[in-house]
Image (cartoon, rainbow, N blue to C red):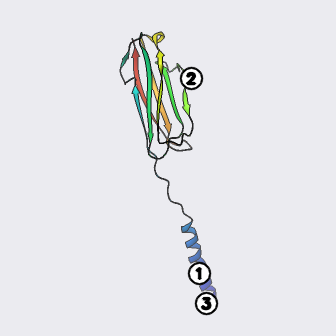
Amino acid sequence: MQFLKKILVLAVVGSVVFFSACTEEEPLNETTINITSPADSSVVAANDLATLAVSFAATVELFDVTVTLTDASGNELFEPWTAAGTGATSLDWEEGPLDLAAYAGSSLTITASACDDAECLTSTSATSSFSVE
């Protein structure tokens, strides 16, 4: 009988330790990306200087973010801009003024992405395509 009591006490203590060791789930991080310039489907005059602008926001934290500019064939026109583990909940990125005259008659795409977690298991991205004429 004493042996059963000891087993029962050990089971109760073990259960308490096991369940108290469980940690609270981390809050879900939702990332939003807004490409503000140039607007999707817009036309940039070849003789004008262009500004690329992107706003990033997260409910918990912004992790690795990247911005690229590509032509219709997917070739990167500039070195991608990146920021690793910013720790902030918002970030405004702007590049310009840029002379895009060499790309007159082309369709270009700006792509912005951000990891939703530190391991980058999931990510959020946005694209905006525009033409230079």
Mark 3 lies on a secondary structure that is: loop
What's under tag 3, amino acid-wise? Answer: Met
Question: What residue is at 46 percent from the left and 10 percent from the top?
Answer: 101
In the displayed structure, 123 sits above or below 100; it is below
Q: Residues within 10 Å of mark 2 (few under 14, many from 20)?
A: few
Residue 49 placement (x, y as % from top left): 44, 15
Sequence-wise, the earlier of marks 1 and 2 is 1
Residue 107 placement (x, y as % from top left): 42, 17
Residue 32's quadrant in the figure?
A: top left
Residue 130 placement (x, y as % from top left): 39, 20
CA gap, disc 3 and disc 2: 75 Å
Q: Which residue is mark 1?
A: 9
The N terminus, quarter of image: bottom right
State left or right for residue 101 relative to residue 120.
left
Q: Residues within 10 Å of mark 3 (few under 14, many from 20)?
A: few
Sequence-wise, the earlier of marks 3 and 2 is 3
Residue 45 placement (x, y as % from top left): 38, 12
The C terminus, quarter of image: top left
Please identify, in this view, whether the residue under mark 3 or under mark 2 is nearer the observer.
2
Closer-to-camera residue (30/13): 30
What's under tag 1, amino acid-wise? Answer: Val
Please identify, in this view, whether the residue under mark 3 or under mark 1 is nearer the observer.
1
Q: Which residue is mark 3?
A: 1
Q: Which residue is mark 2?
A: 79
Point out the residue furthest to the bottom here. Answer: 1
